[in-house]
Amino acid sequence: MKSYQVTGYGEALEVRDLEKPTPQGGEVLIKIAACGVCHSDVHLWEGYFDMGGGQKLQLGKVSAMIPFTPGHEIIGHVEVVGPDAKGVSVGDKRVIYPWIGCGECGVCQSGNENLCARGRNLGVHVDGGFSEHVIVPDAKYLFDMDGVADELACTYACSGITAFGAVKKATGLGADDALMIIGAGGVGLMGVRFAKAVLGKAPVVVDIDENRRSAALEAGASLALDPNDRDAIKAFMKSTGGAAAVIDFVGAEQTAQTGLKVLRSGGKLIMVGLFGGELKTPLPMIPMRAITIEGSYVGTPAEMAEMVELVKTGTIPPIPIETRDMCEASQTLEDLKSGKVVGRAVLTP
Ligand SMILES: [Zn+2]
Ligand SMILES: [Zn+2]
């Protein structure tokens, strides 16, 4: 099988002819139909995350050692089932939940496989979807998204579940509680749509870019603010008393600071984006304002199942998709890094 692998951090992906794996036990071999390209793929390809203050978190310790095949937004057809695999048949089309844990530890047993310390995340710890085939350890990670186009369906495995998992953390807001979403890129816009569908709330969206603010209003935001417009932020604070929950889909120093600033007492800042940097904040304000800072990393298998059912109702408008041939994987990472991709880029082998 042809796989596009990271063989040197930051260098062009190498096309390698690898032996097609044979599924053992409950494993399933998937013939890939499409794989989305995510900002995390750019980090994995470059080999580090920006930790702020010039510090870098080098990968390799927390992800697959090179060479490895990136790609975690995968849809494809079941090609071979292992002798113990249950619940799928050859030919079935499925989206893969890639945030797979060890399946045995307490964290996995409690349903949070995405937080397992011995994760086997596809395209992160083990070979992923920039390939013709991929092995999935168990059929329970396969989801039927029948009725949703392949190139769109696969994006729910990361950008979708990331937005959904974050929005679920804002459950329990009162009728008058304001919800703010920072960042109206692809994942943020999906967050706006899920907020309406799951929480019944039209969020206030903050973004520095005017086009993205318009897109947020079209997606159902009640208001779209420029964070540099002090009067607009002041007016928001005055009319709402501050946000009860803020979801930061960017994860930069500036956006986290904005989030903390607009929270009301008892409010919660949900951090999602991995842009990078560090947060400096006066510690006494955390207890005095009784605020919570909560991280959100993708979502659980149960949230994936719930999201898939919601998407299949057809009530979540699709994000823009740009389909490319998989041989353009390297160029796509470059384009994503330099902000040249509108919506989601999806590769097809
Ligand atoms: Zn991703
Ligand atoms: Zn585990």
Image (cartoon, rainbow, N blue to C red):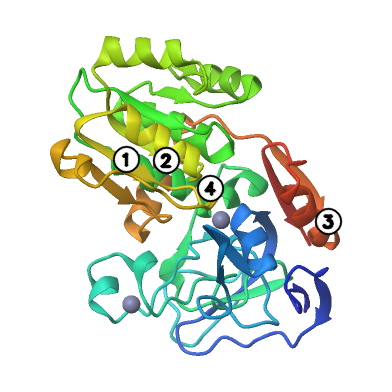
The local crowd at label 2, few if under 14, some if 14 to 19, many if 20 or more residues have their Cα within 10 Å, is: many
The alpha-carbon separation of the residues under discs 3 and 1 comes to: 35 Å
Q: Is residue 181 above or below residue 55?
A: above
The answer to which of marks 1 and 4 sits earlier in the sequence is 4
Amino acid tagged 4: Ser
CB under 8 Å between discs 1 and 2: yes
Image mark for residue 159: 4
The alpha-carbon separation of the residues under discs 3 and 4 comes to: 20 Å
Amino acid tagged 2: Ala
* Residue 258 placement, left or right of 78: left
Q: Residue at x 40, y 53 (%)?
A: 304
Q: Position of residue 289 (x, y in %)?
A: 17, 35
Ligand 1 has an atom within 8 Å of the beta carbon of the residue at disc 4: yes
- The residue tagged 3 is 331
- The residue tagged 1 is 269
The answer to which of marks 2 and 3 sits earlier in the sequence is 2
Q: Position of residue 213 (x, y in %)?
A: 57, 21
User: Of circles 1 and 4, which is in front?
Assistant: 1
